[in-house]
């Protein structure tokens, strides 16, 4: 029988500014850019909300709706999530509901449709589509998180412009933009399509959110539409600085307990696990073997990004909604994201195979890291072989003595101890 490394429970400390009064900050930011003076009584405002599990998202949307209603406007929410939710209006409404965004909860209607308006092409031939309900509104407000993209690197990545061109493009527009990205690169398409849509649509402002390494709201900024590109660039610098990372470079095996669209657009954030298709960070962890155990319930079977893994479990494979996953991958022009890894009935079998294929080091001395997901890296488990690397860091603390990597009677890992949970 294969031996296993002993595991240390570790706490990471991150540079972590935090917004304590999120609702108050949202209201103050909207006041700062003069939203009340720019939107008249009776005017409609489409509030674009995406499919990511953004911290405090429902609170931010509810506060924005309240401020708009106080100004006499008539806000409504539109899902801005490309093809997610199986590219159906009902599926996208259900995703919002999973984040606590319902008509009763936010105090505004939700108009979910996959219908778009074709708005011509950019100067370099990129076709443009935009959510019809949003296009017919008097104003559009974008709510999104700014963070490093999981597929591309550049001055502009995930943020307000991305939601404008891909999220509000629905299935048709998102697919066309991603195909253009294959030819021209993300940065160029974001600038070109974003600039054209801002000129052809009544986009008033955005609320940009940045999170810290503890998955908390670190910054809220209201951004006039004309400043989307400038603020996407500037806030991306902060998002990169605050991005949580593994405390160990080049692990032999990374065990990820769960993946899903609520965690990252790619299921597992490639800025954390590495394997970024089109360029990554200088400190890419270069994981030798990656084993992912489960899908989150919130991802509703969407296993986009499962192709990043080398090994998984049969129970994860059974949980996949194949149609939804493939649709998302093809819309993103990233079919390899749906590639199924080797899978086993139990965690023990998968870990045995991963360690046996990770190099010559005996399994007992393998460099192993176990995390809940790529959003929660403040508490994790690291094998004793990495102790010296951990000791050299000033931002890491070993909080529990080493213990054996244990399995239950079936051969699966037990849940992470409560101390390691959020």
Image: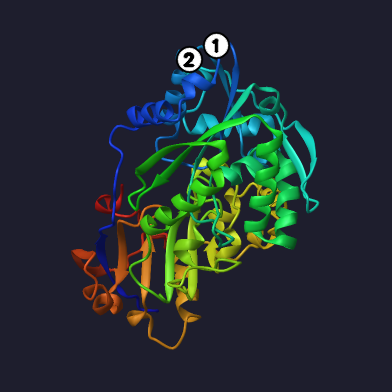
Q: Is 90 situated left or right of 102 in this image?
A: right
Q: Which colour scheme is used?
A: rainbow
Quarter of the figure with the N terminus = bottom left
User: Is residue 373 at least partly visible in the picture?
Assistant: no
Image disc number at residue 71: 2
Question: Across the whole image, how many numbered discs are drawn on residues?
Answer: 2
Q: Is 352 situated left or right of 320 in this image?
A: left
Q: What residue appears at the point 38 percent right and 26 percent down from the top-left corner?
A: 27
Q: How far apart are marks 1 and 2 (CA)?
A: 6 Å
- Find out whether the residues at labels 1 and 2 contact each other: C-beta distance under 8 Å: yes
To which quarter of the image does residue 242 belong?
bottom left
Q: Nearer the viewer, residue 15 or 382?
A: 15
Q: Nearer the viewer, residue 20 or 86?
A: 20
To which quarter of the image does residue 8 belong?
bottom left
Q: Nearer the viewer, residue 284 or 130?
A: 130
Q: What element carries label 2?
A: loop
Q: Is 264 situated left or right of 44 in this image?
A: left
The picture places residue 173, in percent across and down from the top left corner, at 73, 43
The picture places residue 287, in percent across and down from the top left corner, at 46, 73
Q: In this view, does 338 lie above or below 275?
A: above
Per the image, the residue denoted by label 1 is: 41
Q: What residue appears at the point 69 percent right and 25 percent down from the top-left corner?
A: 133
The picture places residue 124, in percent across and down from the top left corner, at 78, 54
Q: Is residue 56 above or below residue 41?
A: below
């Amino acid at each position: 029988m294969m031996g296993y490394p002993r595991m240390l429970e570790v706490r990471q400390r991150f540079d972590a500014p935090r917004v304590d009064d999120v609702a108050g900050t949202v209201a103050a930011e909207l006041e700062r850019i003069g939203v009340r003076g720019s939107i008249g009584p009776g005017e409609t405002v489409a509030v674009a909300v995406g499919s990511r599990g953004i911290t405090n998202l429902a609170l931010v949307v509810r506060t924005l709706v309240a401020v708009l209603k106080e100004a006499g406007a008539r806000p409504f929410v539109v899902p801005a999530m490309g093809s997610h939710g199986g590219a159906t209006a009902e599926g996208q409404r259900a995703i919002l509901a999973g984040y606590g965004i319902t008509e009763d909860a936010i105090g505004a209607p939700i108009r979910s449709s996959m219908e778009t308006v074709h708005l011509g092409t950019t100067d370099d031939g990129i076709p443009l589509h935009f959510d019809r309900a949003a296009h017919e509104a008097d104003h559009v407000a974008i709510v999104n998180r700014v963070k490093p993209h999981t597929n591309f690197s550049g001055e502009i990545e995930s943020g307000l412009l991305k939601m404008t061109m891909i999220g509000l493009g629905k299935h048709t527009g998102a697919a066309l933009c991603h195909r253009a990205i294959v030819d021209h690169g993300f940065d160029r398409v974001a600038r070109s399509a974003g600039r054209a849509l801002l000129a052809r649509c009544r986009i008033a402002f955005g609320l940009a959110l940045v999170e810290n390494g503890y998955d908390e709201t670190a910054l809220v900024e209201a951004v006039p539409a004309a400043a989307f590109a400038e603020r996407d660039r500037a806030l991306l610098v902060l998002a990169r600085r605050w991005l949580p990372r593994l405390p160990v470079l080049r692990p032999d095996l990374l065990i990820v307990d769960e993946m899903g669209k609520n965690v990252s657009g790619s299921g597992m954030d490639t800025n954390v696990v590495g394997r970024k298709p089109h360029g990554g960070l200088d400190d890419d962890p270069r994981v030798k073997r990656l084993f992912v155990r489960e899908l989150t319930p919130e991802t509703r079977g969407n296993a986009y990004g499962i192709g990043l893994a080398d090994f998984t479990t049969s129970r994860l494979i059974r949980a996949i909604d194949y149609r939804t996953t493939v649709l998302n991958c093809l819309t993103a022009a990233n079919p390899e994201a749906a590639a199924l890894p080797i899978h086993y009935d139990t965690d023990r079998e998968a870990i045995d195979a991963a360690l046996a294929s990770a190099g010559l080091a005996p399994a007992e001395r393998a460099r192993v890291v176990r995390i809940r997901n790529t959003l929660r890296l403040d508490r994790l488990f690291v094998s004793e072989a990495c102790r010296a690397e951990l000791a050299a860091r000033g931002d890491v603390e070993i909080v529990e003595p080493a213990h054996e990597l244990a399995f239950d009677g079936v051969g699966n890992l037990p849940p992470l101890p409560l101390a390691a949970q959020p």
